[in-house]
Image (cartoon, helix red, strand yellow):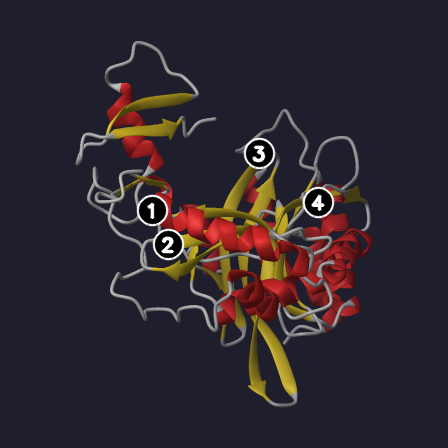
Amino acid sequence: MLCGATKMEILLNYPGLQAVRKHDSPMQQSVREYKGLLFVNDKSFKIHLHQSNSTWLMHNPTDDPIIYALNSQNFKHAWNYLDAYKKQLEPIHLSHQPVPVDIYRRVIQEHQEFVNFHIYLKTVQLASDLSHITIIYVDGKFRNHQITITVNYNQGKLFQIGCCKLPVTLSASDDSLINLFEVFVAQVENFQQFFDVMDVIDQFLWTVDPEMPTRADVRRRVILDVNLSVEMVFNPNHPMTLPEMRLFGPVGRVQQIESVLNNNFESWSEDGDVIDELTKIFEVAVFPERGSLDKECGIGECGICLSTRGHSSKLPEVFCPNSPCDQCFHTDCLYKFLQQSLQEYSTKVQGSCPYCKQRITCENPQQ
């Protein structure tokens, strides 16, 4: 078994490795396995080192003669094996570029301090090549928030925010992993009311787009009735203000709903419950529950591609203005259909509905 100081020494000298811990008993934790990368000059080598009885051995799937020879030498300590393997590789793989070992050590140290400092973490995963750290943070309402922090091996701050699911773009860098993560946590806390509102929307309304909303999505398209839906865009900084709305459906029904909304917009209260406020301005007792209508997702198939979800999982957005027809289409599908007779792409095209031959207009989906 390796003591804590020895384990840290191995990780600092060989920062591409990660200890695989196994609990032998509730009171004992041992490290008998290491996995990851061994950096030699400017090259990296996959390592899977494990302890068998009292001897350290390397997995050797390619029958490497160096590993084969080392496995026969009865190494009692993991670091002795690693030192010997590296010594064998160095003259074979000469380098013109130095490996940034000092940076590797800083990343390992920052990672260890970070794990010990924070308690509201679900997972913290340091990539085996030390290129990034993936963290899942649990907020006070038990919501998970994931962030990827990348390591900068060039000039500048050591850590940079790579990818995170927030309703705003977050760009920051710092030499301290703890300080940079606190920037992310502060934003998560800042948007708690927004997350509350969106969670209520997803729980009580039939959301069809996006199919799997993330914490970054400010838009929801919800079903009002068969072939009738509304897209709502919420302000993440003031989520209880009246959302921007766009209706999708047959022209006649859309005009009726627009008239109702125009009469009721002023009654919206930012101090109320979002579902109560929506039922008030739409003048409905309840919104349809998921799966309660005849259509699988409350919306019919596109009249051109004959599917509900088209390219990039988009739903039909254009409806024929001819009331007896009311056929719906994906914007991409209808634009391509109508554009066939044009010589150049434009912001909007007009033509005949493929079904009833009445005039129909479609905007360029790329605009």
Distance between the alpha carbons at the discs numbered 2 and 1: 7 Å
Give whichever of 199, 51 is nearer the camera.
199
Secondary structure at badge 2 equals strand
Distance between the alpha carbons at the discs numbered 3 and 4: 45 Å
Q: Mark 1 or mark 4, which is nearer the start of the sequence? A: 4
The answer to whether residue 367 is above or below residue 115 is above
Which residue appears at 61% of the width and 77% of the height? 30
Q: Label 4 is placed on what type of residue? A: Leu
Q: Does the CB distance between marks 4 and 1 fall below 8 Å?
A: no
| Residue 185 quadrant | bottom right
Distance between the alpha carbons at the discs numbered 4 and 1: 39 Å
Question: What residue sits right under mark 3 in the picture?
Answer: 91
Whether residue 47 sits left or right of residue 109 in the image: it is left
Is residue 127 in view from this perspective?
Answer: no
Which label was assigned to residue 250? 1
Which label was assigned to residue 170? 4
Give whichever of 311, 255 is nearer the camera.
255
